Amino acid sequence: MAKQGETEMNTQQPKDSMLKRAIGLGFIGIFSYIANYYLRNLLSVATPSMLESGEYTAEFIGLLSSVYFIVYASGQLVNGLVGDMVNPKYMISVGLTVTGTVIAIFPSLPFAWMQVACFALMGVGLSMLRGPIMKMVSENVNKDYSRVICTCLSAASFAGPLVASCFAIAFKWNIMFVVAGVTAIFIAVIAFISLTVLEHKGYFSFHSNKRSGFGGYLQLFKIENFVFYMIVGGVVEIAASAIGFWIPTYLSDALKLDSVTTNTLFSVISLTSALAPFISLFIFKLTKERDIAMMRCGFLIAVVSFLCMIFVPAIWAKVVFLIIARLSLSCCSAVLWSIYIPGMGSTGKVSSINGVINCTGYLSASIANAVFAKLLGLSWNGVILVWCGIAAIGLVAALVVRKKKAE
């Protein structure tokens, strides 16, 4: 089991050595993370062409997506724990290799059950990446560099869909899967070789937490404010996935905007979300690391903005308040993923922490998405009121929680 002192020794290095370590591990983590996100978006960008080919139905594509989602969410729990026991270079390389392989062979498989199995394996493979990447960074560089790298990781997640779109533009859908899969395998090989070299140079080390077992998850609840950040994980994933999913529909259906305006505004909203990690890190430093206070402000702004969307009649004002609400919630998400978790390196349980919080978020978003779909038959104001209530849950949790050390 990794002792706290051992983990801290990894981050107590001369400044120039620490910078080299941060750059090396940062590049590996960022490129692996981009691969993670372009792979998970391939089905989405390929769907129109797959339907047009007549070989697939919308129902079957929906099944593939659902199977992936369920396996990925549950895989976060298992691989979160495994990631604290197995060297990240194996987790990252195996995860990308498995995913790349099944994605590459997917179009050529003759039976539907085989293709479903491919997406189940993709869920397993991609769930092996995030926790180990966070552990690799958090336990090998100091908190300042770690938070900068994780901020870049959060931004890199928005590059994934763009890369997937480029694959879709450049190749026919079936060839796209093959090329994208082979590219992922190539990245896996490069990541493994690079981490091995960094390991030999002393820039990367790993201490296994083998004694924890599944009972080790219970130990996570002893970590300061862990339950609070689980709640935050649920709220911000609902904001990112469930609320984000329905924003284009709200713009076109409730506000009666045309498709060009809707797509443009959704792109603007997505861009602001991509900037949120950098904004949050800047405010975190500016406020002398008052993360809980940032959460309170972020959730409060979101609550007020959602209420204004209901009571302010002007369409332009509704759009502005929607952008403000989404940006505020994205900043709260950035505090969790780019500030809190990277600061947990000394626990030796970063991968497990990531797995539990990520799983909580995905399950929450899945439930919320189903609820929102039911509410659409009533009124959009009712849906927005529920969005407001979700942000209010985060606000109440942030008001109740206390840090042991003064902020």
Image (cartoon, rainbow, N blue to C red):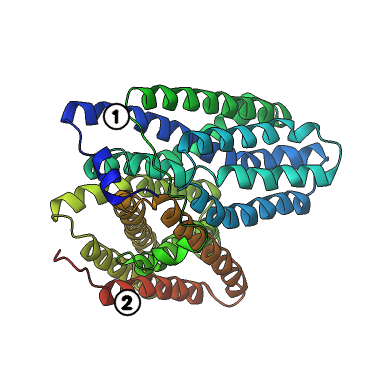
In the image, residue 373 above or below residue 33 = below
Q: Nearer the viewer, residue 13 or 97?
A: 13
In the image, residue 365 above or below residue 21 = below
Q: Nearer the viewer, residue 405 or 167?
A: 405
**Number of dots carrying numbers:** 2
Left or right of 262? Residue 143 is left
Q: Which residue is mark 2?
A: 396
Q: Quadrant of residue 105?
A: top right
Residue at horizontal 41%, vertical 30%? Answer: 28
Q: Residue furthest right?
A: 110
Q: Quadrant of residue 100?
A: top right
* Residue 356 placement (x, y as % from top left): 47, 60
Q: Nearer the viewer, residue 190 or 69?
A: 190
Tell me if I can see residue 243 in this picture: no
Q: Nearer the viewer, mark 1 or mark 2?
A: 1
Q: Quadrant of residue 400?
A: bottom left
Label 2 neighbourhood size at 10 Å, few (<14), some (14-19), many (20+)?
Answer: few
**Among the two numbered marks 1 and 2 on one chain, the one whose residue lies closer to the N terminus:** 1
Left or right of 20? Residue 116 is right
Residue at horizontal 76%, vertical 33%? Answer: 107
* Residue 108 placement (x, y as % from top left): 80, 31
Q: Amino acid at mark 1?
A: Arg
Label 1 neighbourhood size at 10 Å, few (<14), some (14-19), many (20+)?
Answer: many
Q: Which residue is mark 1?
A: 21
Tell me if I can see residue 24 in this picture: yes
In the image, residue 368 above or below residue 5 = below
> CA–CA distance between discs 1 and 2?
39 Å
